[in-house]
Amino acid sequence: MHTVPTWDHRDPSEFLAACRKDLVARYSTVSFQDVAIERIKKTQREDGTSLFLATDENGEEWWGRKVILATGITDVMPDIEGYEQCWTNGM
């Protein structure tokens, strides 16, 4: 992980585990499901409220008002002589 105060150059899985633990402990409405979402579509209820319907890999449906898309990164060092030596390691 880079540029996250107190987590710089630590394993991202440690950060993820700490976040999940804190959220579940603090909010009774939070839970995590480790499933792949295959489809998301925006729908509208009869009262005009917009909702999203997400269908997971098992066919289960998840409804919500908002969708958060999150991605990660991988550092890929270019094949340039001397570049790797210029990359900081935080030490």
Image (cartoon, helix red, strand yellow):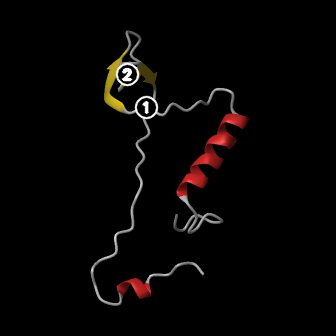
Residue 12, placed above or below residue 27: below
Residue 67, disc = none
Residue type highlighted by circle 2: Asn
Q: Is residue 8 left or right of residue 36?
A: right
Q: Residue furthest right?
A: 26
Question: Which one is in front, 29 or 66?
Answer: 29
Do the numbered discs 2 and 1 sit on residues whose CB atoms are within 8 Å? yes
SS of the residue under disc 1:
loop
Give the left or right position of residue 85, taking residue 33 as reference.
left
Q: Residue furthest left?
A: 79
Q: Determine which quarter of the picture holds residue 3.
A: bottom right
Q: CA distance from mark 2 to mark 1?
A: 8 Å
Under mark 1, the amino acid is: Val
Q: How many marks?
A: 2
Task: Tell me the residue that label 2 is attached to.
Answer: 58
Label 2 vs 1, first from the N-terminus: 1
* The disc label shown at residue 35, or none: 1
Q: Is residue 20 left or right of residue 69?
A: right
Residue 4 image position (x, y, % from top left)? 58, 64
Q: Residue at x 46, y 25 (%)?
A: 64
- In the image, is residue 79 above or below residue 82? above
Q: Position of residue 56 (x, y in %)?
A: 37, 26
- Quadrant location, the C terminus: bottom right
Q: Name above or below for residue 58 compared with residue 66.
A: above
Characterize the local packing of mark 2: few (<14), some (14-19) or many (20 or more) Cα atoms within 10 angstroms: few
- Residue 17 versus residue 83 in the image, above or below: above
Q: Quadrant of residue 45?
A: top left
- Residue 2: x percent and y percent? 52, 67
Label 2 sits on a secondary structure element that is: loop
At x 60% / y 53%, what residue is drawn?
15
The spot of residue 1 in percent (x, y) is 52, 63
